[in-house]
Image (spheres, coloured by chain):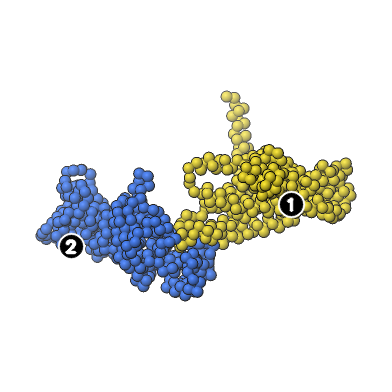
Amino acid sequence: MAVLTLRALEKHYGSIKAVTGVDLQLEEGEFLAVLGPSGSGKSTLMRMVAGLESPTAGDILVDGKSVINVPPQHRNVAMVFQSFALYPHMSVRDNILFPLVSRKVPRQEHAARLEKATRMLGVEDLLDRRPNRLSGGQKQRVALARALVRQPELFVFDEPLSALDAQIRSRARAELRELHDQTRITTLYVTHDQVEAMGLADRVAVINEGRLHQVGTPHELYNDPADLFVAGFIGNPPMNLIPIDQTTIAGIRPEDMLVDPEGDIADVAIDLVVTIEHLEYLGSEWLVHGQFQPGDGANSKPLHVIARLPANSHPEFVTGQTCRMVGLRKNVCLFDRASGKRRANGRAGA
Amino acid sequence: MSTSQHSVSPQSAGRIARLGAYLDQPKVLAWLMLGPAVLYVVAFVGFPFLLAIALSLSDATIGDPSLDTFVGLANFRTVIQTDAFQLALRNSLIVTAGTLALVLVLATLASELLVHAFRGKRLFQMIFILPWAMPVSLTAIVWMWFLDSTFSPVDWVLLQLGLLGPGGVWGPFKHLYFLGNEWLGLASVIVADTWRMLPLATIIVLAGRMSIPEERFEQARIDGAGVFRILFHITLPALKPMLIVAILFTGLLVIGEMSLVQLLTRGGPGHSTQVLPYWAYLKGIEGGSLAQGAAIALCLFPFLLVASVLALRAAYRSQEA
């Protein structure tokens, strides 16, 4: 267990800046997810922490000590790759023992450590198998056992669930979180999947084009996005971003959008006349897709907007029909159009 | 256009189309495609092989090449008892084993080097492949000059280093006479064979090396493994199938090769650097005893067959695992 600190971290490949100016601190025992689209620099960030890449500038500290010049074999960082990278010519037992043998842990400790790690992951019965005789879920557990067996001070995960079938992914997610709650090993978890990041992590760091956009709890990211990128990235579907004048863009979640509200409503921030494009039925909810003509005059192209309605509302729109969509001031976040940053007085109540 | 043309062309087009459809059947097409290769193997491998067996069981000579007298295994008994044969067998095994050992180590190192990007890699690769592109005779001539009894640059370097010449570690002479000495001669043949076979072996091993995902090495480094542990516990086990293929190809090519020995040492001094293929040639063609030459050449066959089958099965199994 350790505190991981990244200070003004930079990684450039020629003129390409993969990571720029990243400051981040993982507290002891924290589970932090780095979330970003592909090519955002999240993998580079993780590889620098593991020691597989050396930063162009900046510092990486574990418990306050710089590890910049420490090669990966001498860092106590365990990593689980997306492919799990099991050694195909070794049995599961030898795979799990490999870090102990490599690090010259006394032989008499091996059995106890192996037993503990395999029991935690439930892979005791697989020890004599070769990796190619394992299912995806079993491979993932073996890879986790191999990472766990050496008692690392830091875990680094590279999308460890994306190679799994969709059916077992949500269970694997829960088990991963339980494992973390048992071991309390500080964890850096890299993913492009916001469901994983939001569901697993204590805090999420949103990264794009090498820059951190926001670091916060899943709740903060969803309800208080710091800028337009986070607003347009978090949530499925994400926030509707509606220009209201030359300098301001308003963001509103689809579920906060009121469709054809009845009676008088006060404190209206957004009031749109929307042409319905189509309805999407998702079982537990409806998505109403429509488009409207922005009133700011800056551009004349119609913009897309989505409202989310509960399943029991049974909307009866047909394509081409118009309706009114309203956003209340308390539900609207305001962003500066030029900088993309959130306005300080963006919302009355959260 | 005449009317006759009009009446003929649809018919002939129909015939061609019918022929095309016939040839297009998988069974017919398969034989058509395989035919030339099968013919080649039967004519230039199968027939000579059977002829060699027939010759080895007869008393055929250059003067009387007919296969009319069957002598059983008498030729084998005769040739096996000669000193020249026993030396040649020993030397064939030493040269092949020595070349294999050197080639495997160097090919593994070279593939480790070539898998990484570096400046001038293309040029290096081109120079590296040259020995393979060179005719064997040219290789032999290059090494003959390199190891010449009077003009050898190797001798000169050793002399300058003080290892050779008066007061030197390796005696008072100014030359080692590489090709005029039993063990130095064998070593020279091994080095020349290694030089010639390394490109092929490297290409085979490199193909295996490039198929290992980079993540496996990164995982091993993170797991705490150093350079040697990664080489012996990660790289080599993964290369095993390709190493076996490289052993098979290099071994078969070296053990059946006679021109290097013929040009470098002529099997001498005496028969001390003699190898089986060259001895079979000397006995059967130069000496005129076709039957004994065939018997000598066939002596290696059972060993090679068993070795090939075992190696291929091992390669297949380690690829499955």
Instruction: Report which residue position mark 2 lands on.
Output: A350
Residue drawn 52% across the image and 60% down it: B229
* Residue B189 visible at all: no
Q: Which label lies toward us, 1 or 2?
A: 1
Numbered disc 2: secondary structure: loop
The type of residue carrying mark 1 is Asn
Label ID, residue A260: none
Residue drawn 35% across the image and 55% down it: A45
The type of residue carrying mark 2 is Ala
**Residue B173 percent across, percent down from the top left:** 71, 44
Question: Are there few (<14), some (14-19), or many (20+) residues within 10 Å of tag 2?
Answer: few
Q: Is residue A153 left or right of residue A239?
A: right
Residue drawn 15% across the image and 62% down it: A349
Return the residue nearer the eye: B224 or B184.
B184
Instruction: Report which residue position mark 1 lands on.
Output: B91
**Residue A346 percent across, percent down from the top left:** 16, 56
**Residue B226 percent across, percent down from the top left:** 49, 59
Location of residue A335 with respect to B124 vertically, above or below:
below
Q: Is residue B291 left or right of residue A168?
A: right
Asked if marks 1 and 2 fall on the same chain, the answer is no
Numbered disc 1: secondary structure: helix
Return the residue nearer the eye: A294 or B8.
A294
Chain shown yellow: that is B
Chain shown blue: that is A
Residue drawn 68% across the image and 49% down it: B170
In space, the residues marked 1 and 2 are separated at their CA atoms by 88 Å
Return the residue nearer the eye: A281 or A343.
A343
**Residue A147 percent across, percent down from the top left:** 43, 66
Q: Residue A3 is drawn in which quadrant?
A: bottom left
| Image quadrant containing the C terminus of chain B | bottom right
